[in-house]
Image (cartoon, rainbow, N blue to C red):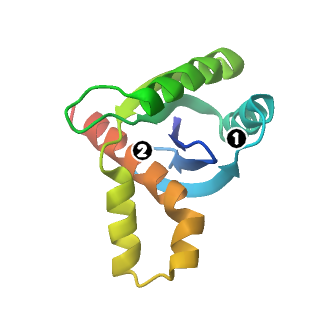
Amino acid sequence: MRILGLDIGSKTIGVAISDPLGWTAQGITTIRRSKKEKDLEDIKKICTEYSVETIVIGLPKNMNGTIGESGEKVQEFSELIKEYTGVKVEMWDERLTTVAAHKAMLEADLSRGKRKKIVDKIAAIYILQGYLDRLSNK
C-alpha cells in the first residue's frame, strides 16, 4: 500500500511517497510546473511507478480554517488529478507545513539556495507523514 503526498504550489509540486507499509514518508522529487497536462502526466507516471493507492494533497487553509483563493485552486487541480489518474484523492490541512519545513531546514543549517530547492518536497513529507500518523492512530 503506497500513498503519495503532494504539496501543490503555483510554480512547483513537492512529492513524497510512503514506504510499502505506510509508516514513513520520504521525499522523492519536486515537479516544476509547466502546463496542466504535463503536470498531470508527471503525477500519473509516479502513481504508476509506485503503485499508488491514495494521493494525499495538502489543502492550504487560512489560519481561521476558511479556504481562500489558493485553496480553491488546489481543490480544482485535485479534482483533475483524481480524474486523470483514477486514484483516490484525500485532502489534508497543510497549515504551517511550509513553516515547519523551513524551520527544520534552518536547524539543519542548509543554505538559502538549498532550502529553496527542496522546501516543497519537505512540505510534502510533512503532509504525508501527518496523514500516515493519523492512520496509524486509528
Q: Position of residue 22 (x, y in %)?
A: 43, 42
- Looking at the image, which residue is at 68% across and 22% down? 85
Circles 1 and 2 in contact, beta carbons < 8 Å: no
Please give the residue where the numbered disc 1 appears in the rendered image: 46
Mark 1, other Cα within 10 Å: few <14 / some 14–19 / many ≥20: some
At mark 1, the secondary structure is helix
- Looking at the image, which residue is at 55% across and 24% down? 78
Residue 23 visible within the image: no
**Type of amino acid under label 1:** Ile
Image mark for residue 58:
none
Mark 2, other Cα within 10 Å: few <14 / some 14–19 / many ≥20: many
**Type of amino acid under label 2:** Leu
Closer to us: 38 or 15: 38
Q: Is residue 103 left or right of residue 32?
A: left
Residue 133 visible within the image: yes
User: How far, Cα to Cα, is label 1 from label 2?
Assistant: 15 Å
Q: Position of residue 25 (x, y in %)?
A: 45, 52
Closer to us: 126 or 112: 112
Q: Position of residue 80 (x, y in %)?
A: 64, 19
Quarter assignment of residue 59: top left
Q: Position of residue 3 (x, y in %)?
A: 51, 37
Please give the residue where the numbered disc 2 appears in the rendered image: 128
At mark 2, the secondary structure is helix
Rendered view: 101 above or below 52: below
**Residue furthest toward the front?**
69
- Looking at the image, which residue is at 51% across and 29% down? 74
